[in-house]
Amino acid sequence: MKAKHKKLLARTGATVLITLILLFVSVPSVVVIMSAFNSTAILSFPPQDLSLRWFERAVTYRDFQRGFINGLIVTAWTSGIALVIGTALAYAIDRFQFRGKDLLETILLSPLVIPHFTIGLGVLMLASQVSMRGSFATVILAQVILVLPFVLRSVYVSLRNLDRRYELAAASLGASPLQVLLRVDLPLLLPGMFGGWLFAAILSFNEFSAALFVTSHATQTLPVAMYTYVREYTDPTMAAISTIFIVTTSITLVLANRFLGLRKVLAIEESK
Amino acid sequence: MTKRQIQFLFVIPAVFVAFLLVASLFSILQFSVREHVPGSLVVGGFTLDNFGRVLRPVYASVLRTTMELALSTALLTLVLSYPLAYALARVPSKAIQSLILIISITPLFTGDIVRTYAWLIVLGNNGFVNSTLMALGIIERPLQLMYTQLGVTLALVQYSIPVMVMVLTTAIAHIDRNYEKAAASLGAGPVRVFLKVTLPLSTPGIIAGVITIFAWTLSAFATPQLIGGGKVMMLSNMVYLVGFSSFDFPFAAVLSLIGLVVSIALLVAMNWSSRRVEKMGLH
Amino acid sequence: MMLDSTTCTATAPSVSAKHAVRLDGIGKSFGDVTALRDVWLKINHGEFLTLLGPSGCGKTTLLNMLAGFLTPDTGEVFIGNDCVTEMPPHQRDIGLVFQNYALFPHMSVAENVAFGLKMRKIPREEIRRRVAEALENVRLGAFGDRKPRALSGGQQQRVALARALVIRPRLLLLDESLSALDKNLRSDMQVELKEIQRRVGITTIFVTHDQGEALSLSDRIAVMAHGEIQQLSTPAEMYRSPANSFVASFIGDINQIGGMVERIEGEEALLVLGANNLRLAVPLSRCQGVKAGDGIRLFVRPEHLRLTQEGGQLRGILRARSYQGTHVEAFLDVDGADLVRVRLNRPGLAEALSQGAELGLDIDAAECLVFPQEDKQP
Ligand SMILES: Nc1ncnc2c1ncn2[C@@H]1O[C@H](COP(=O)(O)OP(=O)(O)OP(=O)(O)O)[C@@H](O)[C@H]1O
Ligand SMILES: [Mg+2]
């Protein structure tokens, strides 16, 4: 009886602790969503009246619109390029022996630890030496460098989990190496590739630090436009657009979890 | 096509990106040894003076703040993330696992600006915390949370939790549950099992996590920029200030190099410690 | 592709090849490890040949060479009349079944079976017909639309077999294909596999380290150790007349007793055995390369020993009995030998005996085997 009591107490304690931590993580988002529906320009808690006017302003604000379009352009190119390059390299690292393999891998994974502002400044300086400051090409280069490690890892993990015997079986059934690649490897790698691509796309669309350094007014992405806005205005337009971001991101994550398994995409190991 | 040509095809685009990355970092190095010509974007001749300026009190204090923030963030993040990671690795219900995972990693994906803006309206003088506390009559005047190290740390911790959770969950899931069962069968209660078996066996994850978050925090820009508001400055903010307000790119380059060197040092430390841990036979 | 022309083109030009498979002096090393050492092997058309041997003896390596996943360091591989040493796997027309089946998880059962036919650009209609036929053949006609993971182990096994056979390969290779199944299913599958193999008439090479499986399925068995074929013969021959002491102890249960050759007399060798200097005359045909004065080991199977209460050529103490259903095994402590295993077909006798009783053993000298003491023990 007493042991049972103790166990219940421990479980309750653990649940409360976890809930509190999760609250700490999620409260800012909840507060943002709440204030986005506030009718007055001055933030106040709890909101006085509900209104959608800030959403209207957010989606009609010129800089946000341009930032959104720019962001889509940059994200589409970045995630596409990173997917192709990352997949090819992951395959090469797993299957081929070539000189400088470790060095290449180390260099391309280094953006995981190098500060984004360092990379942003570096790309900016490189671009200004060849007079390409502020161009889309420069912005996309910085983003590709930043997201490539994620694609590389995601595809590499799926490659490692791919049973080589599928390839052997296909070859014995008459599939040429190219057919093995297209009909066996590619379909089996697709979830990993999609996960890596999604990862890259979200990170690229939301990336701010490096983007601030490399974009110009003409190429600025949505987060940069939002940064400028926060510095100039205090009305809840920001809350509205943030709400859109948060909701979209959460839905994407829930879907990714449902259909891909987030653990797999994030390369978190299952417990045995 | 020969096999070599195919391999070439697979590798060459990546080599190109790697080349541009190295070239970018090399540009920083190049700029760092050039003279700054005030009022001009064009840099002057060769000089090493830029490096000497790092030691001036303003910059030294920025470096100290950066390190303090990185360290306190890493430790606090560890404390808050461990329970989440433990639950992720050990709670049997898939639904609860998914819930915890999604909530705890969402901040990673909403982006710096959205996340930081959210903290602005949580911590501000008319913000959520102060309004709530005043409404409850706990305080009379708003607490100063904005522009303080505490405020910046809180926001940085939330920003770091997703990464820490990912590292720790993998480490804890890695532990063979039979060790825990063995300890329990030998008479250790749940708390002792945790303290004597699970926690020590997750040391590699803890070390990796703390170092990763340290590096992760060094990279933070938007959070200290907006919540620090120029009063709490990290290295990244100083680089931006120097580069984009005084257009002193050579000195911005020097400061960036410091960030680069610290990150590389952390990476080396991480490799070294994980090898040490392997030697101890923990993994 | 460059073929090594010197030996490869020197193939017999006859229209139909004498052997289904021929290995000429195959050798293969991985760094310091010699996986195969000068292997020569000829396999007849329609034959069921089993490669049997302990782990790491090179069975999979040999199979991989036949399938084309490995190229030998030395020697040539012939399938029919063709030298295939350097031919890539997808051109070889070989059916392959793995231990864990390797059914493509992203394709249905029918798509798995159709895969090889698609690679051969066979018309749609014919593919459909042959897939249905192949699935029918392994009694899985109704399962075509399922995904492989929705099948039981035995069913997956049969799909793998159908997938390998539907391309009408020249050769069927099975690497430990039954080892993942539990015991009952396994013996069912053995019967089924053998039946299908005979019906199709396909030359088959089967790898296992289960000697029971090898004895019951094979036309011939090749016992391997350390990358070499120790003996190649029919199961009965292998059991009755192993070529060396390794094969003798690897196949079936066998007792060993140390001793020496006293002298050779006519067609018999006179041996002195054990601590009590038992004398035994063994036909020379059952002795391998021994001469007077040599130290030897005598091998005798449990069923060739007879237990007696009184007398007997050897005497020993009964240490343990183990009930086996159809018979009883008794273990006797005999001087100069490890525990000697005796097979008793009349269980009643054993039960009458108490542990610790001293008993006699008669040896059926015509069934014994004698190998030199220093015979290589891989
Ligand atoms: N790719 C390889 N690299 C290095 N050594 C190898 C490789 N493949 C096989 N070997 C070695 O060659 C020897 C023969 O291996 P092989 O796989 O043929 O054994 P096997 O008879 O199939 O064993 P098992 O019954 O365990 O499957 C072993 O010592 C093995 O360690
Ligand atoms: Mg094997």
Image: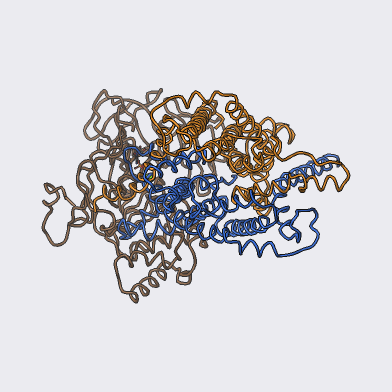
Chain colours: A blue, B orange, C brown
Task: Give x and y (percent) for residue C118.
Answer: 33, 67
Q: Residue furthest bottom?
A: C125
The quadrant of the rendering that contains the N terminus of chain B is bottom left
Q: Of residues B59 and B166, which is closer to you in this image?
A: B59
Q: Position of residue B259 (x, y in %)?
A: 52, 33
Compared with B90, C177 (above or below) is below
Quarter of image, res C82? bottom left
Visible in this render: residue B158?
yes
Query: Where residue C348 sits in the image (x, y, percent)?
Result: 55, 44
Question: Quadrant where the C terminus of chain B lies?
Answer: top right
A241 or C151, which lies in front? A241
Side of A146 where B221 appears, left or right: right
Q: Is residue B205 above or below residue C127?
A: above
Q: Quadrant of ligand 1?
A: top left
Question: Where is residue C16 drawn, in percent x and y?
Answer: 16, 61
Residue at position x 86%, y 48% from top?
Answer: B135
Is residue A265 placed above or below B80 in the rendered structure? below
Q: Specify whether residue C55 is in view.
A: no
Front residue of this view, candidates B51 and C80:
B51
Return the residue found at the far right. B137
Q: In this figure, what is the number of numbered marks?
A: 0
Q: Is residue C279 left or right of residue B25?
A: left
